[in-house]
Amino acid sequence: MSTRKPNSTFSRNEQCIIDCDLTYAVQKLGGRWKLLILDKLAARKLRFSELKKEFPYITERMLTLQLRALEQDGLVKRTVYAEVPPRVEYELTKSAIELGPILKQLSVWGSKNRNI
Amino acid sequence: MSTRKPNSTFSRNEQCIIDCDLTYAVQKLGGRWKLLILDKLAARKLRFSELKKEFPYITERMLTLQLRALEQDGLVKRTVYAEVPPRVEYELTKSAIELGPILKQLSVWGSKNRNI
DNA sequence: CTCATTACTTACAAATTTGTATGTACCACA
DNA sequence: TGTGGTACATACAAATTTGTAAGTAATGAG
């Protein structure tokens, strides 16, 4: 999520693994808090501090990291307002919105699968 | 995937994160080689050695770990034949088969999303 | 008796992800 | 001058995941 060794076996393996569109997609969603964040943002755009309030156990560092990754991957748009104190809003991109229905199905599958 | 410290912040956070059915589902699929394995098994049941041949870069250890996790999570069924040398076959469970169409959609999304 | 085959297991190390603690910039307001 | 709020950044440590290397059991073939 942050620094990577470009020549580790880990990274080289990632290259071929990610050939698979599905693996690629799931890697983008696999961060610890990413889906929870996407879910909150699906309802409405939120500020950094509002997001933080939604998740009692997330740290500011983690929230920042996950948001940055989501932004990099084109799932979240970040807007900074030049005010003091600062205001930053996060909202889903079109791509993330398209993902919505699929995630809904996965969620249904998850609830069914876990009760076995 | 193997040993866990049950009282780390990491593990405690997992408890609440996994409340979310969606996060739960994606955690099950998030291992490095899991989706690739599921994809191969979707075509037909395969032996350990056959799976290994499918992925040039996976190690036996990783293949074992991922298969064990998939089995634990009820996605893969493992059948051992009492022969020598041993023969072990892996196949998808009903639950994993139900997952198929959803993964297909995710895959399509992945390919669209990556080409932006 | 030796060797080959299959499906692992084990000990260990490296890489990555997650968590902890503390600090920063900006300016309005008291 | 001092304090407060927002949205981070940074240094560091812990936990987890992934990779490396080597070894094992069973037994039929030679």
Image: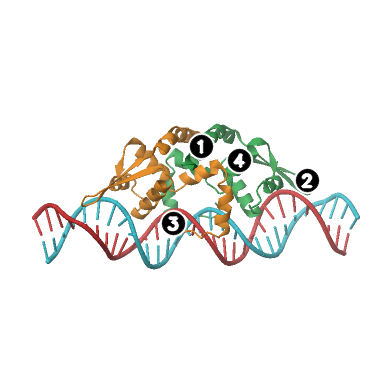
Chain colours: A green, B orange, C cyan, D red
Above or below: residue A37 compared with residue C3? above
Element under disc 4 = helix
Q: What whole-number distance in Å separates the C-alpha atoms at marks 2 and 4?
A: 26 Å
Please name the residue that numbered disc 1 is placed on. A106
Identified by mark 1, the residue type is Leu
Which of discs 1 and 4 lies nearer the camera? The answer is: 1
Position in image of residue B96 (x %, y %): 41, 38
Are discs 1 and 3 both within one chain? no
Identified by mark 4, the residue type is Leu
Label 1: few (<14), some or many (≥20) within 10 Å?
Answer: many
Position in image of residue A115 (x %, y %): 49, 41
Q: What whole-number distance in Å separates the C-alpha atoms at marks 1 and 2?
A: 40 Å
Are discs 4 and 3 both within one chain? no
Q: Is any part of residue B33 visible from this angle? A: no
Q: Chain of mark 4?
A: A
Label 4: few (<14), some or many (≥20) within 10 Å?
Answer: many
Please name the residue that numbered disc 3 is placed on. B2
Please name the residue that numbered disc 4 is placed on. A38
Disc with the residue nearer the chain's start (2 vs 4): 4
Which of discs 3 and 2 lies nearer the camera? The answer is: 3
Q: Residue at x 66, y 53 (%)?
A: A60
Instruction: Tell me, for residue A64, which label it has, or none.
Output: none
Q: Residue at x 61, y 36 (%)?
A: A93
Assess whether mark 3 and mark 4 are in contact (beta carbons under 8 angstroms): no
Please name the residue that numbered disc 2 is placed on. A83
Q: Chain of mark 1?
A: A
Q: Is residue C12 left or right of residue A43?
A: left
Q: What whole-number distance in Å separates the C-alpha atoms at marks 4 and 3?
A: 29 Å
Element under disc 1 = helix
